Image: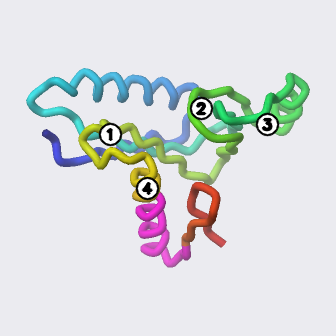
Amino acid sequence: MSQHVFVRNLGRMSYLSALEVQNQMANKIKESMNSKNPLKGILLLVEHDPPVYTIGIRTKQYTIKDEEILNKLGAEFYKTNRGGLITFHGLGQLVVYPILNLKLFEPSIKWYVSQIEQSVIDLCNQFGLKGETSPHTGVWVR
């Protein structure tokens, strides 16, 4: 088994283009699961251009009017199959998409999210920034 999670910097890319790369990488990881050397995963780094709002499956219904307002602001708008609510990704914001074979990691989703948050806090510290968690999922920098 590969002991590494690989990192790929996609640079600036539209949401749909990045989603296509995510799907390709997920398929590669799935295909490797029954091999002698299954892939542990990959982290995709991207800055979305144009800016985008995505909504998850745990969100209120957004109307066409809401979507039009966001489009007039210069942002795209997509419904996704991820968990969570509405999220904005804009220029200058680095988005990390982890695509992992979770069977090769600790099985708890709560553990997984906690590890991601701690990794982001550690990375912030390396840049002299104080990242912290809150009752809401995510890492916040002031």
* Distance from Cα at disc 2 to Cα at disc 1: 27 Å
Of pointers 4 and 2, the one earlier in the residue sequence: 2
Task: Tell me if mark 1 has few (under 14), some (14-19) or many (20+) residues whose alpha carbon lies within 10 angstroms of its own.
Answer: few
**Predominant secondary structure, magenta span:** helix
> What is the quadrant of residue 68 in the picture?
top right
Image location (x, y in percent) of residue 92: 62, 53
Disc number at residue 33?
none
Please tell me whether mark 3 or mark 1 is closer to you in this view. Answer: 1
Q: Amino acid at mark 2?
A: Ser
Q: Residue at x 38, y 44 (%)?
A: 43
Q: Residue at x 36, y 29 (%)?
A: 25
* Residue that carries the numbered disc 4 in the rendered image: 116
Percent position (x, y) of residue 117?
Answer: 48, 60
Q: Which residue is mark 1?
A: 102
- Residue 30 falls inside the magenta stretch: no
Q: Which residues are magenta?
A: 117-130
Quadrant for the C terminus, please.
bottom right
Left or right side of 41 for 77: right
Amino acid marked by disc 1: Leu
Residue type at mark 3 is Gly
Q: Which circle's residue, 3 or 1, is located before the other in the chain?
A: 3
Residue for badge 2: 14
Disc 3: which residue: 74
Residue 44 position within the rendered picture, expressed as x and y whole percent measured from the top left: 42, 41
Using the image as rendered, state which of residue 94 and residue 41 is in the foreground. 41
Q: Tell me residue 27's x, y (percent).
A: 34, 22
Q: Looking at numbered disc 4 in the image, what kind of residue is underneath it?
A: Ile
Question: Looking at the image, is mark 2 or mark 1 nearer the viewer?
Answer: 1
Distance, label 3 to label 1, CA atoms, is 36 Å
Q: Earlier in the sequence, mark 3 or mark 2?
A: 2
Please rate how many residues cluster around mark 2, counting C-alpha atoms within 10 Å: few if below 14, some from 14 to 19, many from 20.
some
Q: Residue at x 41, y 42 (%)?
A: 98
